[in-house]
Image (spheres, helix red, strand yellow):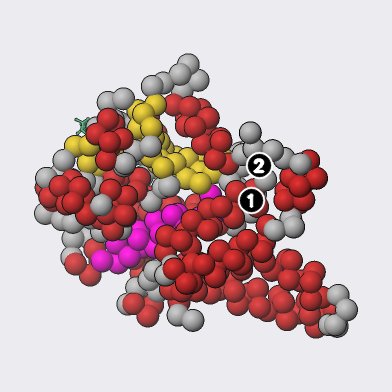
């Protein structure tokens, strides 16, 4: 099985099926010690493959992660803040308000670290990505961009960000971008890596790349086409069009327009996501995983993965409780 096919299968192997398999095969037939040892080695191997394969680029593709991170570390400022709450929702705040939440080099590195943290958060169900001080994100920090304007370094930065945003998209969490103010350039690309987009009145998503003599490089073009189709995507990119909330809703780029409550937009976004993450985390995560496999794999592979994920919830606690309660769906 190639790395690409392996990626989505690893999503469930890594965390869900392993413990159940331990119970099933560890009983009668195996010597427990040898079994645990083999299983740990297998899991170490799987973990290594998991991180290598969930990313698109590694050294085989000429990607030198350490080198580009060393370069990016020179461009400091801002932060990417993560908070994980007891209700299973995490929040990532893109925090660099003096530059309209543009991504400095250190923020790109931090985003990758926060995604790693979330990959290891086994009880998580939802994620809200938002920008500090009522604006989303204005893309790359232009100061950093100017300093790494040779194609080789540009492509390394692009590979790092594609890896990170692809891993964000593949998290077993239902993710929402809360867009207040502007989502420009890389900021527009970031919001397409979330499952849903909620926009506030007066906000805009704008792929400004063409006006910068560029095309999207963080995976935003490919994801935009999946979201709204190639005709509309072509218009947005070639015209560097401003997409306002009503227009985004019509295009299928936004999922809702938030009007603002007393508690603020963040808690409105939390309320919005709640029905989708209701219930036990293993079921909610399994739902996201079947969607990822359906989206990313060929039909036959997706069907097989769906069967495996199904096996992780069938006869599980939530399933047995629902059966015992005689749950009706009126
Ligand atoms: C693949 C991704 C792609 C790439 O890296 O290849 C990119 O993302 S390229 C970057 C695309 N983004 C931009 O070009 C944004 C440029 N900025 C603007 O258009 C405006 O600043 C805007 C519309 C975001 C805000 O305009 P407004 O009038 O409301 O405020 P200011 O212009 O005064 O901005 C306040 C302050 O923020 C600084 N700023 C804003 N964006 C960036 C940025 N991307 N990088 C660095 N700094 C940014 C701006 O310069 C102002 O700073 P000041 O010191 O007050 O001049």
Horizontal and vertical percent position of residue 138: 27, 41
Res. 250 mark: none
Instruction: Write down the region rendered in magenta.
Output: 155-173
Left/right of residue 10 with respect to residue 101 in the rendered view: right
Q: Give x and y (percent) for residue 88.
A: 61, 42
Is residue 86 at least partly visible in the picture? no
Q: Is residue 85 above or below residue 16?
A: above
Was residue 223 drawn as part of the magenta stretch in this picture?
no
Above or below, 17 against 276 in this view is below
Q: Quadrant of ligand 1?
A: top left
| The C terminus: image quadrant | top right
Residue drawn where x is 66% and y is 78% of the image: 42
| Residue 9, position as x, y percentages in the image | 54, 69
Front residue of 275 and 152: 275
Under tag 2, what secondary structure?
loop
Whether disc 2's CB lies below 8 Å from ligand 1 is answered no
Majority secondary structure of magenta residues: helix
Task: Name the mark on residue 279.
Answer: 2
Residue 225 lies left or right of residue 198; in this view the side is left
Residue for badge 1 = 283
Residue 31 location in percent, x, y?
86, 83
Mark 1 residue element: helix
Residue density around tag 1, few if under 14, some if 14–19, many if 20 or more, within 10 Å: many
Residue 170 part of the magenta segment: yes
Residue at horizontal 31%, vertical 42%? Answer: 253
Would you say residue 59 is visible in this rendering?
yes
Give the camera-side residue of 195 and 191: 195
- C-alpha span from label 1 to label 2: 7 Å
Q: Are circles 1 and 2 on residues that touch, CB within 8 Å?
A: yes
Q: Is mark 1 within 8 Å of ligand 1?
A: no
């Amino acid at each position: 099985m190639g790395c690409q096919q392996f990626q989505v299968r690893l999503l469930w192997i890594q965390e869900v099926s392993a413990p159940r398999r331990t119970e099933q095969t560890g009983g009668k037939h195996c010597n427990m010690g040898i079994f645990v040892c083999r299983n740990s080695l297998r899991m170490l191997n799987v973990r290594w493959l998991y991180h290598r394969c969930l990313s698109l680029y590694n050294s085989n593709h000429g990607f030198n992660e350490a080198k580009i991170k060393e370069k990016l570390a020179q461009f400091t400022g801002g932060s990417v803040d993560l908070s994980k709450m007891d209700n299973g929702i995490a929040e990532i705040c893109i925090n660099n308000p003096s530059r309209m939440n543009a991504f400095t080099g250190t923020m790109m590195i931090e985003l990758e670290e926060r995604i790693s943290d979330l990959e290891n958060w086994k009880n998580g169900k939802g994620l809200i990505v938002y920008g500090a001080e009522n604006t989303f994100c204005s893309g790359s920090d232009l100061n950093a961009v100017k300093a790494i304007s040779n194609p080789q370094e540009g492509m390394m930065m692009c590979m790092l960000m594609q890896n990170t945003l692809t891993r964000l998209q593949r998290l077993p969490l239902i993710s929402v971008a809360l867009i207040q103010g502007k989502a420009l350039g890389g900021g527009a690309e970031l919001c397409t890596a979330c499952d849903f987009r909620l926009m506030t009145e007066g906000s805009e998503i704008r792929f400004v790349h063409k006006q910068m003599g560029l095309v999207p490089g963080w995976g935003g073009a490919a994801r935009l086409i999946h979201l709204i189709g190639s005709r509309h995507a072509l218009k947005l990119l070639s015209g560097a069009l401003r997409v306002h909330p009503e227009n985004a809703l019509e295009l299928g780029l936004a999922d809702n327009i938030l009007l603002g409550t007393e508690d603020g937009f963040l808690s409105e976004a939390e309320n919005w996501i709640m029905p989708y993450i209701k219930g036990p985390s293993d079921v909610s995560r399994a739902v996201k995983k079947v969607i990822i496999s359906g989206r990313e794999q060929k039909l036959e592979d997706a069907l097989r993965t769906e069967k495996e994920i199904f096996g992780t919830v069938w006869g599980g606690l939530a399933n047995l409780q629902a059966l015992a309660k005689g749950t009706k769906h009126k």
